[in-house]
Amino acid sequence: MHRTLTIESTEKVGQKIRLSGWVNTIRSHGKIAFLDLRDRAGMVQVVFPPNSLGMVEDLKSEWVVEIVGEVKKRPENMINDEIPTGTIEVAAESVEVLSESKTPPFDVDTDGKEVSEELRMKYRYIDMRRDRIQRNLRKRHEIAHFFRNFLTDEGFVEVETPILTKSTPEGARDFLVPSRKQAGHFYALPQSPQQYKQLLMVGGIEKYFQFARCFRDEDIRADRQAEFTQLDMEVSFMSRDEILELVEKMYISIIKNLFPEKRIKEVPFPRIPYKEAIKKYNSDRPDLREESDELAFAFVVDFPMFEKVDNGWRSEHHPFTMPVEDDPEKIKKNPGDVLAHQYDLVLNGNEIGGGSIRSHRPEILEAVFEVLGHNKKEIREKFGHLLDAFEYGAPPHGGIAFGFERFLMVMFGEENIREVMAFPKTGDGRGLMMGTPSADLVKDQLDELHIKIINKNEK
């Protein structure tokens, strides 16, 4: 007998079925008992009449069991309209315990917001059993699947780029990985696949995307984790407006198909110059909603290329963005006046995507790096591979990257992106379930990597 999911039981009235899942709750009413069985599809009520009460007396919540029984219609006065299986129940004929459970550290029947972050993250495999997290993770899959199909239909190719890469200045600290075979050398985990996706354009892919894992050693906030996913895109031979039109089409389509109950405030999405956004809304990610249930998308455009800092200039976005000014000498002479072909997508006051048309001319890219304080030797050491590639027929190209979890957080009405991730870190960057980061490395491991741990307190 094949396993039946709880939701499938409604179609098998009068049939004997086999259910497998977790004991959610047990309710005893004298000569009869009820068990709510939970699986990935939902919940179903199992009834134990007087002659089968012995099967249920030792069971406890969160035990994993297999139940065989007959599906029966519930009496009219016992129908539960709040669950999809509320019109039926399963009369138990046998119960097999597949796995026992200790008493869980918290209840999974609630939304979990009353439980401390540390406890939830330590027992995340229990925490994710609750309905809210299950829904979030399953809906996350649906959305990712939709994006993949949409972009595939638009002619995009999904390409994976390396995780072990080179440390480059992209705005945040890198996570570094020591090399065993090249002593004193380090890989870096990618803050984004920026250079690789531009090299894919040089390679003739023309339309690329991937769900890219990104790593940034920066302070964690409600909308930020050290390790996260971005939907990354790059295209050749498309203008800024064509890219924005494609992005708009994609998000309108996903809302229509997966969130039909939601209403987009304005189509086409407004395009707001950066200076206007700052002047009018005092923010470069304005919340344009008039009602709380609206989805207010907008593009913010015409950003400055550089931002003044104490020791010089830094990129407003990243150094690979193409300046509007195409004269290298003017870029170096008046960096504060240079605008960038940069654009952000904002939703309800959250930046959910950022991109730009890229510099594909070596002389422009070199001028930008000089403004940022790099000398010609440093530029060749850090970016020579990219500059060399651009000398072999680089097409004009641009792209955008979307914070996947940020979009999900907004759409699901969550206040923290950890609620839409399977195994997030705590606010201080710890993985309590696995005990990361860890100091329990053996000396042989450190020796192989040519690393010595130095205690700052040692004299």
Image: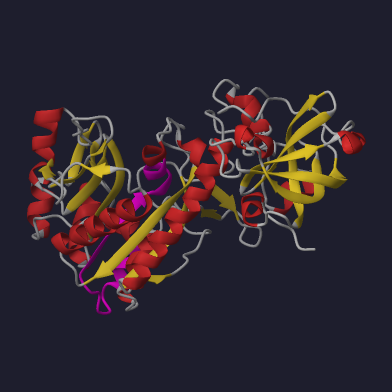
Q: Quadrant of residue 261?
A: top left
Residue at the spot 9% in from the left edge and 48% down from the top edge? 333
> Magenta region: which residues?
383-408
Q: Find residue 158 and report its horizontal and vertical position in percent.
A: 42, 69
Query: Foreground: 390 or 152?
Result: 152
Q: Is residue 390 magenta?
A: yes
Q: Is residue 459 visible?
A: no
**Residue at point 16%, 27% (across, down):** 282
* Closer-to-camera residue (111/237): 111
**Residue 441 pos. (x, y %):** 74, 42
Q: Residue at x 85, y 27 (%)?
A: 31
Relative to the observer, which residue lies in front, 374 or 29? Answer: 29
Q: Quadrant of the N terminus?
A: bottom right
**Residue 376 falls left or right of residue 416:** left
Is residue 363 among what the camera can see? Answer: yes
Toward which corner of the image does residue 97 lie, by quadrant? top right
Q: Is residue 163 above or below residue 277?
A: below
